[in-house]
Amino acid sequence: MRKLTRRGFIAAGTLMMFARPVLAAAKPVTLIVPYAAGGPNDNFARLLAEGMGAELGKNFIVENKPGANGIIGASQVARAPADGSMLLMGGSGPLSLNILLRPSLNYGFDSFKSVAMMFDGPLTITVPAKMGVNSLAELVAYAKNENRALTYGSLGPGSVTDLYGLIMSKTLGIPLTAVPYKSTPTSLIDLITGRNDLSYMTPIALADHQKAGAVKILALTTDQRDPALPEVPCVTELGYPQLKASYWTALHAPKGTPDAIVEAYSTAAIKIVQSESFRKLLVANGQTEKAGGPQTLEAQLETDRQYWGKVIQENHIVLD
């Protein structure tokens, strides 16, 4: 959480004062969401747009631009005028992974200006209950006794779930093979029935199935336990800090957007993300508030370059 000192409040207020005339003269702000309408990210975007609009006295319009793993939406913002009239609700996939995986992409890290980090969410290491494995140590023993590579469901080549399997295979020293799916529900069915041995889905997608005894969540990919799943250990406490991973969501503006506008948007976004209504929506969707300004987001992008970039390079993964 970003904490402002008295001097910080004065500085932020000064920037807002200088930004307001620019904001008032500018067009309505279009918030591009590179995902389909009706999903969790769409809900987050609409609550954010409503709050930022009220905070800044401007009209924020949410526009869904799904497709091509987020490339369509991100490309539109990368090409947009740098006048504060368009923002991207980006994240691990549309930004970091696409840029690291696709050399021919028409945008890069330097195509955007970081505005605000908002929230992130963990993955799980999960097995079907019928496997009879109840811990990460038991999973390693099980895998080493099998005469085959264990299979895990992924959301396609280059996705967080796909790449995480490569990290886990190397870290635990067990052979794993990805099985790509177009959606989480179909992957979940094959996990529950035992057609796949592993999953790295989000806790929110699995919590009810864990309670029903259909799956066993062995660990969360975090450095602390989740109060909603207090019985599930995290990878750090199990001695595997290198397995810590998450997927994040943030705000980006086109490169060249004036600092005063970026600061105004950043301050407003952080306030909304830290509000009670937004936090309730985060909890309901298994996400964690990570609100912070441009520097926080820049640090996350650098972490991605080191963490995901390393596995992509080591495995010589290149996508068109």
Image (cartoon, rainbow, N blue to C red):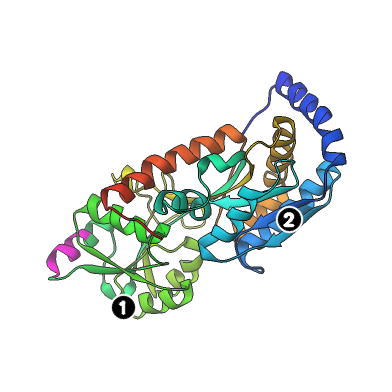
Q: Quadrant of residue 41?
A: bottom right
Judging by the rendered image, the residue that carries numbered circle 1 is 194
Q: Which residue is mark 2?
A: 47
Name the dominant secondary structure of the magenta segment: helix
Dot 2 or dot 1: first in sequence order is 2
What residue is rendered at 37% in x and 40% in y?
306
Q: Is residue 99 left or right of residue 263?
A: left
Q: Quadrant of the C terminus?
A: bottom left
Instruction: Give the residue type at disc 2.
Output: Leu
In the drawing, does residue 144 fall left or right of residue 234?
A: left
Residue 125 in sight? yes
| In the depicted structure, whether residue 9 falls above or below residue 56 | above
Using the image as rendered, state which of residue 189 and residue 89 is in the foreground.
89
Tell me if mark 2 has few (under 14), some (14-19) or many (20+) residues whose alpha carbon lies within 10 angstroms of its own.
some
Q: CA distance from mark 2 to mark 1?
A: 38 Å
Please tell me in which quadrant of the rendered image residue 173 appears: bottom left
Tell me the mark number nearer the camera, choosing from 2 and 1: 2
Position in image of residue 307 (x %, y %): 37, 43
Q: Residue at x 66, y 68 (%)?
A: 37
Q: Mark 2: which secondary structure?
A: helix
The x and y percentages for residue 279 are 66, 51
Q: Position of residue 170 (x, y in %)?
A: 23, 52
Question: Residue 143: within the magenta?
Answer: yes
Magenta-colored span: 140-146
Q: Check residue 168 for magenta coloring.
A: no
Which quarter of the rendered picture does the N terminus lie within? top right
* Residue type at the position of mark 1: Gly
Mark 1 Cα shell of 10 Å, populated few (<14), some (14-19), many (≥20): some
Judging depth in this view, the residue of 280 and 199 nearest the camera is: 199
